[in-house]
Image (cartoon, rainbow, N blue to C red):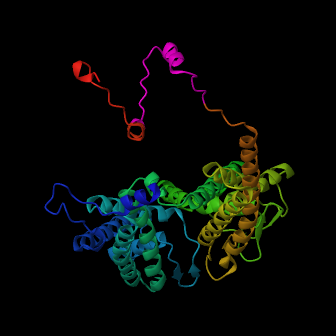
């Protein structure tokens, strides 16, 4: 009953008690003002992102000017870079399709669209799941049109971005980021999670915990690999000799590719590893590499044909996914401790399987081709990461959730129930003990009086004599 009341309260449209229409519900998801504001928000987010990319291109153009490339060429390059930030592949003449794109650049349009959705929800009183979806669609549709227009206008004889992919990627990024921003602006996360059932909430929390553990472990593994190959890293920087401005731009490029490197490290820990070209593999059991591009972040790749790391380090890395799954299973049981053992195991497996599917989707975006030659396959295999992640994380989460649920039930089954407090034998004893007066109310006094009416008494005096 309370859950129905809470859900209805969250989904109910807000009203203004002081406004002229205080008695009528406002429907912001269908209002014309919301559509106009969403169009402005989409244009503002796209314009801010395009301006940031233009600044980077102008800095690089000033540092290394190219003859024949004027302001129009700079704007077209900035538009291509803006599309790359939305993970749109580019066809380059003489090289082929470039699909190995930095995931870090997606954070820029994602953050702008998140802020747009949040401000849209607060200013126009967006509330309820349907209104949040309507606001996200109202921003995503014009944003996708802008992406398509930029893809058409940025095409040159040297590079061409895919127009259909630009429209789809722009719509997907805008819808997801605006949805999260509008949902956060409509209600706090705790209130939003209250709309979910306990089962769904526990599965989502467990998969999020497993994903967080793997992300931290992947970042630490990437940092450790870079620290062990510091000499190769410095040598590659000296060979490139980018200069002061070029070194700054190169640092930004490496930071943009850092999420890709973390996902590669996670694929490495799962077992399938990743490839840096056709016929290559980097995995804990061994590595087979060819000539890699001159990019400083790739200096962390192992150079030996076999595993150069000690055996214990490979064992620790391979055990991390099982540890992440086990932690996710414990989180599942912590949120729903009263679930039976079999139900807890199923929820734990669903939590690990969801984390494995998310990793597979991220792995698909973390790699891609770098042309039509030998580097046509770069990054982890999406389907291998998905299958192995579902099995490893799912089994580990199911096992830990079942054990934790059994232990919780055993601990609470062995504890005897607490007896109720003893009542005092008489009210006088209670009165003497507490020092307070006890008043007893007979609720059935009227029934007693009606069943046994009082006998009338004869009046006294001379009239009472026979």
Q: Quadrant of residue 374?
A: bottom right
Q: Nearer the viewer, residue 355 or 29?
A: 29
Horizontal side, residue 425 vs residue 138: left or right: right
Quadrant for the C terminus, please: top left
Q: Position of residue 273 (x, y in %)?
A: 74, 66
Membership of 115 in magenta stretch: no
Q: Position of residue 141 (x, y in %)?
A: 36, 78
Q: Quadrant of residue 184?
A: bottom left
Is residue 431 at least partly visible in the picture? yes
**Residue 20 sits above or below residue 337 on the image:** below
Task: Report the number of numbered marks.
Answer: 0
Q: Nearer the viewer, residue 277 or 137?
A: 137
Is residue 159 at least partly visible in the picture? no
Q: Residue at x 47, y 69 (%)?
A: 85
Q: Main secondary structure of the magenta part?
A: loop
Q: Nearer the viewer, residue 205 or 175?
A: 205
Q: Position of residue 177 (x, y in %)?
A: 43, 65
Q: Residue at x 43, y 81 (%)?
A: 167
Q: Residue at x 50, y 13 (%)?
A: 432
**Residue 69 sits above or below residue 435 on the image:** below
Q: Nearer the viewer, residue 103 or 370?
A: 103
Q: Quadrant of residue 367?
A: bottom right
**Residue 37 sits above or below residue 409 on the image:** below
Membership of 441 in magenta stretch: yes
Outermost residue on the front side: it is: 466
Specify start and end residues of the magenta stretch as a single range. Answer: 421-445
Q: Position of residue 226 (x, y in %)?
A: 67, 52
């Amino acid at each position: 009953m309370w859950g129905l009341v809470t859900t209805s309260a969250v989904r109910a449209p807000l009203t203004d008690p002081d406004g002229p229409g205080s008695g009528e519900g406002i429907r912001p998801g269908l209002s014309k003002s919301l559509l106009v504001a969403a169009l402005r928000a989409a244009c503002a987010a796209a314009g801010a992102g395009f301006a940031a990319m233009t600044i980077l291109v102008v800095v690089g153009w000033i540092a290394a000017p190219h003859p024949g490339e004027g302001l129009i060429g700079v704007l077209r390059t900035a538009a291509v870079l803006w599309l790359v930030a939305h993970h749109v592949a580019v066809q380059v003449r003489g090289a082929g399709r470039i699909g190995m794109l930095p995931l870090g650049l997606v954070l820029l349009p994602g953050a702008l669209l998140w802020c747009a959705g949040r401000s849209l929800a607060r200013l126009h009183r967006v509330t309820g799941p349907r209104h949040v979806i309507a606001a996200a669609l109202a921003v995503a549709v014009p944003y996708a049109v802008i992406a398509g227009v930029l893809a058409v206008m940025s095409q040159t004889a040297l590079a061409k971005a895919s127009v259909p992919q630009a429209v789809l990627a722009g719509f997907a990024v805008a819808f997801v980021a605006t949805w999260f921003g509008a949902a956060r602006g409509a209600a706090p996360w705790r209130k939003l999670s209250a709309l979910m059932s306990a089962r769904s909430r526990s599965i989502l929390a467990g998969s999020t915990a497993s994903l967080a553990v793997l992300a931290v472990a992947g970042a630490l593994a990437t940092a450790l690999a870079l620290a062990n190959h510091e000499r190769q890293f410095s040598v590659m920087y000296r060979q490139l000799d980018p200069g002061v401005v070029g070194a700054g731009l190169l640092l930004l490029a490496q930071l943009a590719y850092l999420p890709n490197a973390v996902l590669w490290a996670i694929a490495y820990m799962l077992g399938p590893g990743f490839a840096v070209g056709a016929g290559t593999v980097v995995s804990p059991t061994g590595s087979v590499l060819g000539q890699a591009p001159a990019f400083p972040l790739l200096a962390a790749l192992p150079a030996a044909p076999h595993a150069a790391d000690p055996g214990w380090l490979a064992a620790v890395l391979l055990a991390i996914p099982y540890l992440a799954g086990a932690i996710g299973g414990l989180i599942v049981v912590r949120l729903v401790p009263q679930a039976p053992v079999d139900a807890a195991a199923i929820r734990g497996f669903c939590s690990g399987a969801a984390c494995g599917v998310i990793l597979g989707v991220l792995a698909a975006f973390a790699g891609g081709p770098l042309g039509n030659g030998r580097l046509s396959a770069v990054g982890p295999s999406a389907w291998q990461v998905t299958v192995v992640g579902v099995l490893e994380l799912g089994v580990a989460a199911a096992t830990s959730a079942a054990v934790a649920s059994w232990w919780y039930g055993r601990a609470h089954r062995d504890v005897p129930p607490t007896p109720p407090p003893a009542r005092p034998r008489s009210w006088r004893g209670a009165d003497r003990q507490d020092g307070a007066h006890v008043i007893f109310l007979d609720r059935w006094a009227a029934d007693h009086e009606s069943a046994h009416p009082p006998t009338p008494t004869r009046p006294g005096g001379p009239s009472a004599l026979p």
